[in-house]
């Protein structure tokens, strides 16, 4: 559905996006995960053709024409003065759809999102969560092939988020629908789809971003001490120093019941506090004590089901998380 | 001071009795200003949308010029248009001088910078998400501009009313281009000047009161619009 080639975008001299290649297939549900400032919104704006790259090319299936085949729900959309119903039917009005057809189209979607009962209410009287549901509804009623959703559950409570997630999952299951959503909630990303794209500082990375921390790198050797927020220390092999973000790929962490005498510089003791099976991989969350006993750190560790069964691991058990300084990725 | 009080008393009698001369000049003011402000809005609003939504070289300089032209002296406009419409002027053959059409031309020149500059300022201050959200919902460029106009309608109406207020109360253009011809181009402001000069203080005062009532009504309307839509 989308083919991005050598995309570059700069804002004020800073590189906001740098994507050599990205191919998104038609009919799939993608979630783009990344921290704030990763370039998620910039990427969606380009996919909706609201913005253009400085360099490179974005090709959408069926050509770049027909912008009406794409709908986007912005993170902080504008709600037009008037009723809830007027807002929901706006996109259909733009397409000169007949009034009777509009009524037939919007009713089931508004009911699904639980906003049918206050369709006549002025939009300004709604809570933020309810407004977000209106924004989703007015995009869903357009029944476009591509729907782009930018941080749609940010800053709203769990009840509203659950309703929206359910509606989005139903929407994504529709034949031929391509849904591309951004979030900075990794758990939600995996709850919704297997196709998670990781975006960091404008670039796509293969490493799952489960263990991202802010750290202060100190030292003069090629191996630096990374002091995490709270004072915990780990070792990272990097030339960089100062305040950075680091990521420890959960696939590169070894788990052991006993302290391991090895070349790996990071050997952290902790307790298993959560076990989740996801796509045939076990995600263990260990509450680990770093070198200096300051503040515990939650560390995601991915192991295979076989390893999990063989080691007979359980909640509350003591483990050692072992990883090399080179497994710490400085972003 | 007594002549003022007597003048005021007589003015209210004229208004109460719906004096024909008083009604005539009031109507002339209303219809000429109405056409002027309509033409001006028809030219200024699209121009303001173009200025605000398009990127071009010299945009900020243009806005500065428009802001300066808001304070354009009426007699300067009168003089300028007079030089074009008088017999020796470029458009002298059209015979427009001392006609309502000449007054309308002058008033349009006066009101347009006000309506344009205030509308540009309103659109600048409007929420940037309006057009973007409309575009994400499949609006065409024109439809997105219509949505912007719809959302900023209160401020746009204020800009048009400000233009109306400016030309309804001006005297320079009306006098120089209309010529204060009775039953033809004499409006409230030129009548006030004329009646005062010939000592008809009561009629001048009555017209002055009407002018004030209009000014007050426009301001009241502006406040109501702001309260409801801004």
Image (tube, grey):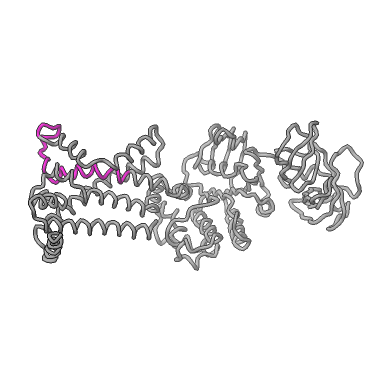
In the rendered image, the quadrant that contains the N terminus of chain B is bottom left
Confirm whether residue A1 shows in the render. Answer: no
The spot of residue A67 in percent (x, y) is 47, 44
Locate residue B172 relative to residue A79 in the image: left or right: left
Locate residue A204 relative to residue A327 in the image: left or right: left
Q: How many marks?
A: 0
Residue A76 vertical placement versus B94 (above, below): below
- Residue at 14 percent across and 42 percent down: it is B176
The spot of residue A231 in percent (x, y) is 78, 46
In the rendered image, the quadrant that contains the C terminus of chain B is bottom left
Locate residue A59 relative to residue B130 in the image: left or right: right
- Residue at 26 percent across and 45 percent down: it is B111
Q: Residue B70 versus residue A129: which sits nearer the camera?
A: B70
Give the prevailing secondary structure in the magenta stretch. Answer: helix
- Residue at 49 percent across and 39 percent down: it is A64
The spot of residue A150 in percent (x, y) is 57, 49
- Residue at 90 percent across and 39 percent down: it is A262
Magenta-drawn stretch contains B224 = no
Locate residue A106 relative to residue A228 in the image: left or right: left
Which of the 4 image quadrants contains residue A89? bottom left
Q: Residue B207 versus residue A235: which sits nearer the camera?
A: B207
Q: Which residues are magenta?
A: B87-116
Q: Residue furthest front?
A: B1
Magenta-drawn stretch contains B110 = yes
Confirm whether residue B124 shows in the render. Answer: yes
The spot of residue A153 in percent (x, y) is 60, 55
């Amino acid at each position: 559905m989308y083919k991005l080639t050598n995309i570059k975008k700069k804002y004020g001299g800073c590189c906001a996006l740098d994507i050599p290649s990205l191919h998104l297939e038609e009919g799939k549900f993608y979630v783009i995960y990344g921290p704030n400032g990763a370039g998620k919104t910039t990427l969606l704006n380009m996919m909706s053709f609201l913005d253009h790259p400085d360099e490179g090319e974005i090709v959408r299936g069926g050509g770049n024409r027909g912008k009406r085949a794409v709908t986007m729900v912005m993170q902080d959309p504008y709600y037009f003065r008037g009723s809830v119903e007027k807002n929901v039917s706006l996109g259909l009005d733009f397409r000169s759809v007949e009034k009777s057809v509009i009524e037939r189209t919007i009713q089931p979607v508004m009911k699904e999102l639980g906003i049918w009962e206050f369709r006549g209410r002025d939009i300004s009287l709604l809570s933020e969560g309810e407004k977000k549901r209106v924004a989703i509804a007015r995009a869903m009623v357009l029944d476009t092939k591509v729907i782009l959703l930018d941080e749609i559950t940010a800053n709203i409570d769990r009840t509203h988020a659950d309703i929206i997630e359910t509606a989005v999952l139903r929407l994504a299951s529709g034949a031929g629908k391509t849904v591309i959503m951004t979030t900075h909630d990794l758990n939600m990303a995996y709850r919704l789809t297997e196709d998670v794209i990781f975006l960091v500082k404008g670039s796509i990375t293969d490493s799952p971003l489960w263990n991202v921390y802010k750290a202060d790198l100190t030292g003069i050797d090629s191996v630096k001490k990374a002091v995490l927020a709270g004072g915990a220390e780990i070792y990272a092999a990097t030339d960089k120093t100062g305040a950075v973000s680091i990521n420890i790929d959960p696939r590169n962490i070894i788990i052991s019941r006993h302290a391991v005498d090895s070349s790996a510089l990071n050997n952290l003791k902790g307790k298993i506090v959560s076990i989740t099976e996801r796509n045939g991989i076990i995600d263990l969350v260990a509450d680990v004590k770093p070198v200096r006993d300051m503040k515990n750190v939650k560390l995601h560790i991915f192991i295979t089901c076989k390893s999990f069964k063989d080691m007979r691991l359980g909640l509350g058990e003591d483990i050692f998380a072992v990883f090399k300084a080179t497994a710490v990725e400085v972003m | 001071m007594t002549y003022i009080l007597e003048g005021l008393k007589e003015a209210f009698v004229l208004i109460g009795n719906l004096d024909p001369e008083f009604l005539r000049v009031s109507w002339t003011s209303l219809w000429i200003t109405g056409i002027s402000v309509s033409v001006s809005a028809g030219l200024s609003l699209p121009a303001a949308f173009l200025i605000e939504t398009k990127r071009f070289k010299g945009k900020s300089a243009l806005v500065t010029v428009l802001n300066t032209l808001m304070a354009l002296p009426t007699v300067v406009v009168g003089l300028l248009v007079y030089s074009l419409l008088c017999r020796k002027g470029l458009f002298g053959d059209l015979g427009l001088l001392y006609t309502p059409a000449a007054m309308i031309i002058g008033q349009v020149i006066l009101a347009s910078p006000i309506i344009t500059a205030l509308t540009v300022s309103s659109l600048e201050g409007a929420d940037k998400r309006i057009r973007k959200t409309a575009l994400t919902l499949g609006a065409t460029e024109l439809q997105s501009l219509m949505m912007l106009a719809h959302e900023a309608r209160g401020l746009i109406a204020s800009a048009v009313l400000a233009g109306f207020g400016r030309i309804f109360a001006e005297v320079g253009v009306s006098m120089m281009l209309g010529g204060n011809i009775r039953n033809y181009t004499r409006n409230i402001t030129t009548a006030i000047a004329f009646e005062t000069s010939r000592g008809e203080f009561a009629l001048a005062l009555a017209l002055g009161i009407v002018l004030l009532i209009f000014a007050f009504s426009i301001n009241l309307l502006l406040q109501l619009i702001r309260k409801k839509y801004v």
